[in-house]
Amino acid sequence: MTNFIHTCYRIGDIERSVSFYEKLGFVESGRMAIGEEAVNVFMALPGEEEARLELTHNFGVDSYDLGTGYNHIALAIDDIDATLARLAEDGIEPEKPPYRPGGRTTGSLIAFVRDPDGYRIELIERAGGGY
């Protein structure tokens, strides 16, 4: 049996990143020192037993080259307009207004925001089901 456990982002500033992900609904579930070189911060969504997001801060490193291969994580949300309005109050804006991928006229609306280190997060409105 295989289970997806988590994904990990390397971050430049712990408090800045924790604050951002809390605005998306995550809660910090723990921290673990990695010797004297780094610390892992574990972020979970309410109701989940395991953290799905691991934020690794390597001491002395404040930014990373994100490369071109990795794209994003995705979060299912109930109301994209309400979520984006709440995020806008904290200065978090989507890359572009909500849209349906591929020019579809039905199905879920999506939008992308970026965390403080530049990682993309896809917000998928699941009201009405489907993708």
Image: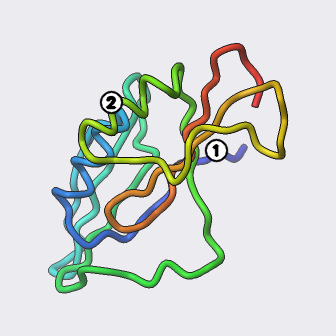
Q: Which residue is mark 2?
A: 86
Q: Position of residue 75 (x, y in %)?
A: 54, 38
Give the answer, above or below, for where 101 lies relative to 47.
Answer: below
Total number of numbered labels?
Answer: 2
In the displayed structure image, the side of residue 60 where residue 94 appears, left or right: right
Residue type at the position of mark 2: Arg
Residue 49 position within the rendered picture, expressed as x and y whole percent measured from the top left: 41, 31
Q: Nearer the viewer, mark 2 or mark 1?
A: 2
Q: Which one is earlier in the sequence, the residue at label 2 or at label 1?
A: 1
Determine whether, in the image, residue 123 is placed left or right of residue 47.
right
Q: Secondary structure at mark 2?
A: helix
Badge number at residue 3: 1
Identify the residue shown where x is 76% and y is 43%: 101
Vertical order, 98 against 129 (above or below): below
Q: Nearer the viewer, residue 112 or 43?
A: 112
Residue 125 spot, x, y in % from top left: 60, 27
Report the amino acid beneath label 1.
Answer: Asn
Q: Looking at the rendering, which quadrant does residue 71 occupy?
A: bottom right
**Which sits in the foreground, 100 or 32?**
100
| Mark 2 residue crowding within 10 angstroms, few (<14) / some (14–19) / many (20+) | some
Tell me what residue is drawn at x 28 percent, y 62 percent.
40
